[in-house]
Amino acid sequence: MVIVEILQIGVIIMAKKQNIFTLIPKVDELLKVEKIEMLLEKVPRITVVESVRENIEYIRKKIIKLNEDEVEAFKIDEEELIENIIQKVTLKNKMNLRKVINATGVVLHTNLGRALLSDTIKEEIWNVASSYSTLEFDIDSGKRGSRYAHVEEIITKLTGAEAAMVVNNNAAAVLLVLDTLAKNKEVIVSRGQLVEIGGAFRVPDVMQQSGAKLVEVGTTNKTHFSDYENAISEETAVLLKVHTSNYRILGFTEEVSLKDLINLGKKSNIPVIEDIGSGTFIDFSKYGLYKEPTVQESVLAGADIVTFSGDKLLGGPQAGVIVGKEKYIKEMKKNPYTRAFRVDKLTLAALEATLRLYLNEEEEVIHQIPTLRMLTISLDEIKEKADTLYEMLKNNVKNCTIEKIEGVSQVGGGSMPLEEMPTVLIRIKPENISVNKFEALLRTYETPIITRISEDQVVIDVRTLKLDEFDIIVNGLCHILMR
Ligand SMILES: *Cc1c(COP(=O)(O)O)cnc(C)c1O
């Protein structure tokens, strides 16, 4: 008897649910709703149909889970359904790779794309991208040209090196150099310089990949000239110096200078290679920052080969630049890895245009290249920026407390790890939602706003913000905190 009753109730609920299912609008009907039809003019049909289907499926699943009481009360809110579809379409129609606002103050944020290209070189990049170009064509002779020729001249001019070439990134550059010069031979490197860079670039692994045999000398904190001297053998192909760009060994330490290593190399007829990581042409100590080795200094000191990144302190696109003695660069150009690591025309256009900016007076260069501008901006200017944003937020955003405090920003990108640049931070504490939720809503906002949390508040560092992003931030905060 009881079982029969339960079964009967089950049948009734099922019948009611069937009824509700028939109330769900059909895909075709929804596509004819004016608001959705309008979307079809701007968005691919497949995106709209997919969004409609997913929303219908969501409602079906919700109905299946209803119990008896809920079935009675259930209604389909068509307005809401349409809004949800529009929201989904908007979301799907966005590029996955897209702009975010970096409010972390970390200038070379590797996860957020490292260096920003200069506004002044847009046209140069787009011209090459959207037209046929001289990529591998020599205009004068009408014959095949080299894609490396476009930047070689300017790199040698800026660095004083005999020759130069460019590959995909600095990791590829180091691999190519070692494969060309030290395959099946020995490379001597200090134990204090066996660097790991974020994203699995480890000097010992790169060595292994290149077929070079790593000969470690010295200890973690101290490597002497004699350590190198004693390690040299018939099998030694290269003396390698790696700039410990993302860490410092402090205290009781000793490192052999590039100059001494070069002298030893000359005496023993072994090339000296330096991986300086963040290649910079600018002496940052002039701006009160840590003195990173400049490319020119290494070339002038007589390094046979110097490698560096294009998108760290140089402020250009992702690339690995190799400069040095022509006889070695020539060999590298013939290495099959060069083809595998070759840079694309967009990179070359961006790199050449960025490098050309360096022909200007330093004051101008620093102004034109965003990475340099953000690193060297004065505290007064930062204060001004912070005041502007602070006032805008104070006047427009409710449901939170906003304050301005002094703080520090970091260089990032494995450059100048100990450098703490004084900055002004804006701290925001939401009143009606948790700080974690607030951070997540900012991060998933239309234009994602990437912040950090400190002492239970969301922190915005104005150093890495562009002025035209202030409005977006204010609107975003209003939108998120008004609800
Ligand atoms: C960053 C860095 C690399 C890797 O450069 P990518 O351009 O990111 O490939 C290699 N060596 C050093 C010393 C670095 O600082």
Image (cartoon, rainbow, N blue to C red):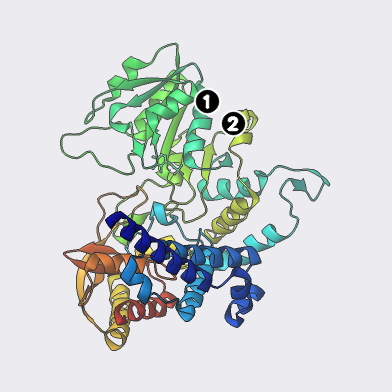
Q: Mark 2: which amino acid?
A: Tyr
Residue at 59 percent across and 58 percent down: it is 353
Q: Is residue 360 left or right of residue 4?
A: right
Residue 102, how many percent across, how many down? Answer: 38, 64
Given residues 479 and 245, the one toward you in this image is: 479
Residue at 27 percent across and 57 percent down: it is 2
Name the image quarter holding residue 437: bottom left
Q: Is residue 327 left or right of residue 207?
A: right
> Which is more N-terminal, label 2 or label 1?
1
**Residue assigned mark 2:** 337
Q: Mark 1: which amino acid?
A: Asp
Given residues 104 and 17, the one toward you in this image is: 17
Q: Is residue 36 left or right of residue 306?
A: right
Q: Quadrant of ligand 1?
A: top left
| Secondary structure state at the residue bearing disc 1 | helix
Residue at 39 percent across and 41 percent down: it is 199
**Residue assigned mark 1:** 179
Disc 1 and disc 2: Cα gap in Å?
Answer: 9 Å
Q: Are marks 1 and 2 in contact (CB under 8 Å)?
A: yes
Split into 4 quadrants, where in the image is the C terminus? bottom left
Q: Is residue 190 above or below residue 319?
A: above
| Secondary structure state at the residue bearing disc 2 | helix
* Viewer can see residue 138: yes
Split into 4 quadrants, where in the image is the N terminus? bottom left
Crowd band around label 2 with a 10 angstrom C-alpha radius: few (<14), some (14–19), many (20+): some
* Viewer can see residue 375: no
Does the closest atom of ligand 1 sit within 8 Å of the Cβ of label 1? no
Residue 227, how many percent across, how many down? Answer: 29, 20
Q: Is residue 119 above or below residue 181?
A: below
Residue 253, how many percent across, how many down? Answer: 20, 34
